Amino acid sequence: MPRTNRSGGPCGSPRTPPSPLDRTFGSIGLAFFAVVFTAAPAWAQDANAGKVVYERKCVGCHGEKGDGKGAAAELLLPKPRDFTKGLFKIRSTANKTPTDQDLFRIVSDGMPGTSMPPWEVLPERDRRNVVAYIKTFAPEAFKEPPKKLELPKEVGSSEASIKRGKEMFEAIECHKCHGTEGRADGPSHPELKDEWGNPVAPANLTKRWNFRGGRSRTEIATRIANGVLGTPMPAFLEAVEKPEDIWHLTNYIVSLGPDSPQPATLVTVSSVKDAIPDDPAADFWKKITPNNILLEGQVIVDPRNFNPAIDLVSVRAVYNDKEIAFHLTWDDPSETKGDGKTTFPDAISLQFAPQQPTGTERPYFLMGDATDGVYLLRWEQGKGVGELSAHGPTKLAAIPGGEASGKAVFKNGQYALVMKRSLAATGTERPSFRPRVFTPVAFQAWEGGAGESGPKMSLTSWYYLRLEEPQSNRRFFIPPAVALLTFAVLGLIVRAARSRAVQ
Amino acid sequence: MRKTFVALTAMALVGSAVMFAVGPRLAGAQGGGTVEVEVKYNGAPQVEKLKVNKDTEKCGQEATIEKVVVGSNKGLANAVASAPNAKGAKPIKAVVDQHGCKFVPHVSVMAPGEMELKNSDDILHNIHTYSTANPAINKAQPKFKKTMTEKFEKPEMIKLTCDVHSWMLGWLAVVPGIAAVTDTNGVAKLENVPAGKQKIEVWHETLGKQDKEVDVKAGQTTKVSFEMKGK
């Protein structure tokens, strides 16, 4: 039945519950409308209402004509969808026509890792209408009805299945684009383009939460079987050895990373007694719990970064009686020194207040300002680790006498870096680190290969860093000493009591 | 005078009746003529070279992107010559091989229907078609998938790419009637073209399309020449 009861109007103004009388007239009205509107195709009605929603919410990126050339389009990557071609990335169908539900899901849930937000805030009716309207941009593409994709019989995850999935991953050469460990760093990644000629990045398979079409096993299996239309990702349904390999591949991909980024709220610095190794690959670091920090694009000052490349840094931090060290890992598809024109050196920095703040006042999080600077512990490809002072994102200066050291290793699309510094510091530009104190810290990262440098970066706001209680040997001595003392006192009391009894 | 006219009319009638009766079969066999299509281009060849950064053991160190190949005597290679309205042609089934990280041949012709796609490279390729009249496909062809069969039912010039090796470019001409691709001298022979007026079309991936009408004579070779203009 066509949806005719639109008392809320396109703006969804609040409705009052209808009285019984209203309901009677309402039903008559409804019957009347049903008779009138069944003559016209049902979607045409929805599409008209959808147009209103589209022009309010979608036009900025997808454009008035639905060609993906809205005002914001040039700033975005991946580019907004051009609906006029009728090509849709995410579909559950065997042919190129998506179901209405496929489109509805993307409108509702958005596309993780892109600028397409979830529109669940809109009433369901508006979202369904907008789907109907989107379809009017390429009516030809929807002439062929959607054909359901039949996935092979599901195979649950097991060690054997994951092993087979890995074999298939190598045999069908997924690594060509997605990289050996799935970090989107394969040899073909820099040259990939979509059917509009725009650069397109392969999925980082270790970050499932960014999968455009969803992270569930069925969704992943569907992408492998079906490909991603309009992009270089081909369909593999007929290109695996046995149909069930689709599920083995799915199980392997799921095994490559966690379901969610599991972000930390506080960076804990563990206390260690041993010497801290410089080598980021040392076993020492594997025993330290990582704190995952999420980064966002810098969009406050020009040049802004609307499509940040680095969205997550894993931080392992330790200190001993002399030094503090930070072990950072982050994904980057290519190790870049930069040509200085379109590419720049990869870099990362930790930001602190120059002196431990006494109150809640902290310097401006975006690398300080003219009056209140910040202290940076920074690593840059080709330069190594340095201590800098900054008064804003373009005003950086090396601190004379800096003594930080470190080492970076790049492997399979991931940097691992150790930065070390003495715990105590001299001068007004360099902070000292003290246990049990909540120390403000912030992070910045640059993917030089994607043209990030200067203010064009990923960053965080202020977080807190806390150095754990120093682990001294006292815990091994004090409790037994207290116990011994107690016994001794008890013994004395007993002896005194006895001697008194004897008297 | 009058006798001559009657005789001529009778002959013409009989002749056309015979033609009408056996025409289609003749056209497909010995009754047609040959059209020798010569395609020339006055401009410079456009061939780009690209350094290969992966799979060099299969793809070589350098990839060649042949946008315009001009041979001896200004002959334009890789152009599709066709008599699209010629009925009764033998269907051509194209075989495209992904070999040495190239589509071989660079331009293939086929009658609407099935074609065969090979991978002789022992590495992953994918076949990504930029078709609009036919369903667009993007299918993986891993090393163990030596042959695939694909269907293209509608006439269309289809661009073929492989996303794994971005320089790989090929064309699949789905053409009804009789078609052939010009050789390095810019010549293509269309055999068994039914006699009579025929539209001859020439298409080139970079230089576009032209057509001419040709009077085809049974058992004879008719030459037709095209001069492509630079874009």
Image: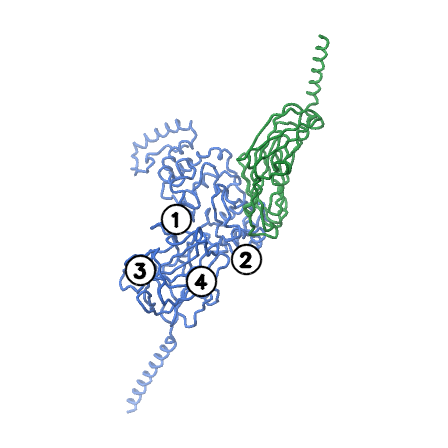
Query: What colour denotes chain B?
Result: green
Secondary structure at numbered mark 4: strand
Q: How is the image coloured?
A: by chain
Q: Which quadrant would residue B180 be assigned to in this image?
A: top right
Instruction: First in sequence, mark 3 or 1: give its number.
Output: 1
Q: Position of residue B54 (x, y in %)?
A: 56, 52
**CB under 8 Å between discs 1 and 4:** no
Q: What number is the disc on residue A373?
A: 3
Chain blue in the figure, letter: A
Q: What's the residue type where badge 2 is placed?
A: Glu
Tell me the CA gap for discs 3 and 1: 25 Å
> Comparing marks 1 and 2, which lies closer to the viewer?
1
Q: What's the residue type where badge 1 is placed?
A: Phe
Q: Are marks 3 and 4 on the same chain?
A: yes
- Please state the chain letter of the residue tagged with numbered disc 2 in the rendered image: A
- Please state the chain letter of the residue tagged with numbered disc 3 in the rendered image: A
Q: Position of residue A26 (x, y in %)?
A: 33, 31
Q: Which residue is mark 1?
A: A306
Q: Is residue A445 left or right of residue A235?
A: left
Secondary structure at numbered mark 2: helix
Q: Residues within 10 Å of mark 4 (few under 14, many from 20)?
A: many
Q: What's the residue type where badge 3 is placed?
A: Gly
Tell me the CA gap for discs 1 and 2: 40 Å
Q: What number is the disc on residue A159?
A: 2
Q: Residues within 10 Å of mark 3 (few under 14, many from 20)?
A: many
State whether residue B182 appears in this view: no
Secondary structure at numbered mark 1: loop
Q: Which residue is mark 4?
A: A417
> Comparing marks 4 and 2, which lies closer to the viewer?
4
Which quarter of the rendered picture does the C terminus of chain A lie within? bottom left
Q: Are marks 3 and 1 on the same chain?
A: yes
